[in-house]
Amino acid sequence: MSLVFLLMSCSDSKKETPQGFVYLEDGVFKVDGETFFPMMLNYKIEMRKIGDNVIVSPAKYYENGDIFESNSEQEILRQFSSHVDLMKELGFNTIRICMDIVLNDDNGHYYITDNGPVYLKDNTDKIIEGIEKMVDIVSSYDMKTMLLLKPPMDEELNDFTAEVLRHFAGNPTIFAYDFMNEPLYFDAEPQRKKEDAVAIVKKWNKMVRKYAPHHLFTIGFAEPIEVFEWDPSMLPVDFVQIHTYHPLRIPNEIWWYSHYVGKPWMIGETSLPADNDSISYDSQARFVEQVYRYTIDCGGIGFGWWEFQEYLNSDLNFEANYTGLLNHDGVTVTKNGNEILGTLKPAAFEFAKLHELKPKTPVRADNYFNMLGYENYVITGRIMCDKKPVDGAVIRGWNLWWGVGMNTYSDKNGRFTLYSNDKNVHFEISAPGYNNVKFDNERLQYSSVDGGECDFSTLQNVDLEYHKISYFPFLANDTMLFEFKPGMFDKAKFKADLGDIELKKIR
């Protein structure tokens, strides 16, 4: 696969862009010659079957989390309009409408509803009509939308996607299509080769260019270990959209994507969960400002928040439940008089002020090479290609039972330090534009860092993984999320060395 083609496919998209459409020029989004910075809020929808109609609706858990408040098309659209009204008032100019939860059975792909499945092949026109009514409401507030679709991995999904693209080809309200949400977690094909992922995305790119030539096209990437299979530097997308969570991880993932992918990028999802108990609402508000600031410092061209309202579900973790800008207490009334069940958290009022911030020179976080502060083991090594060091390689290790994984990166000399609380046994390594290397090593020879005996029996927190690691103990002060206490990320009791590991460029 020629890297020349891949770079060309991600070049500026202005050309003969019609009025009102978003395009890329000099690595930034523009509309009609003016810079456009997407301030994006993620929003979940569901399909409803009401009589013979299929209606696109706000998610059930919005407002009263137990029921659908609206039970006619008119009421449903009025509810959505009130939500968009609030988003606009808060300073958002873009909505990422998430409509990718599509299941399948022997009869085909379908959206699940409270009263039976809505099959795509039988209801394409009705579904598109429902999407159009939502897009029209977004347009009425002079906002843009990104549509997150189910990845068109087979003929039926491909046909449905092509119909969506055709229908909206002349609609400038749609800013971009997101064809896949976090392939790291949601790609159904395990151990996909980079070349195969490139071939898939090349087909998607051609489909967008054929049916919706004035719309942009992206994928929502999760952790930098996406590079093992869905290498963002190689995929022919117009821009990269990254999803990053947890204060110990965020600055490092932003740094890596901004320095090594070589494409325009924006934050598609980020958030700090806050219930005003274990994490305060004030902390969430500070988080908004500080992550946005680091985003623009590192060259990000858009900023997206997950999500509109809390999703309180006992089956999900704390992070998933409390990320919304609205809780479920009280009532919020917009300036236009629209009532919404739930009260805005302080973080919601930060977004309208963010445009006042100006980018500064970014500083790499102190925990870049040990983002979670592991302190039992450290493995060193060097990543090379044709006797030259590889900068920005991603090194992943897992413990014996694959229960805990940890990441690090190589520096400009190709050297890395992989910290962990349990012994690493399984390894995977790659870099943007390079092949993928996997191996096991159960016989690494560890020695004591201080020269003493190797007694592993006293080690603490061996099974600790990032969901259970609080960022509070690492902070130099309570108000700055990405400024850490000195000496917190270079601790280890035992060390081992993997030596030189060779990667090869993919031609």
Image (spheres, rainbow, N blue to C red):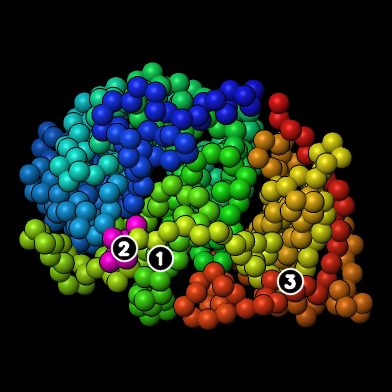
Give how far across and how far down residue 326 sits, in percent. Answer: 26, 65
Specify whether 242 is left or right of 162: right
Horizontally, residue 124 falls left or right of residue 334, namely right
Instruction: Please identify the quadrant where the N terminus is shown.
Output: top right
Q: Residues within 10 Å of mark 1 (few under 14, many from 20)?
A: some
Foreground: disc 3 or disc 1 = 1
Q: Residue tagged by mark 1?
A: 289
Q: Amino acid at mark 2?
A: Lys
CB under 8 Å between discs 1 and 2: yes
Determine the residue positioned at 81% across, 75% down.
Answer: 493
Is 353 magenta? The answer is yes
Which region shows up in magenta?
Answer: 348-355
CA separation in Å, label 3 and label 1: 28 Å
Label ID, residue 353: 2
The vertical placement of 154 against 73, above or below, is: above
**Residue 117 seen:** yes
* Distance from the alpha carbon under mark 1 to that under mark 2: 9 Å
Foreground pick, 379 / 27: 27
Q: At numbered mark 3, what does the secondary structure look like: helix, strand or loop? A: loop
For the residue labelled by badge 2, is the local secondary structure a helix, a strand or a loop? helix
Which residue occupies 28% across, 66% down?
Answer: 349
Q: Secondary structure at mark 1?
A: helix
Residue lying at the far top of the rendered structure: 210
Residue 67 counted in the magenta span: no
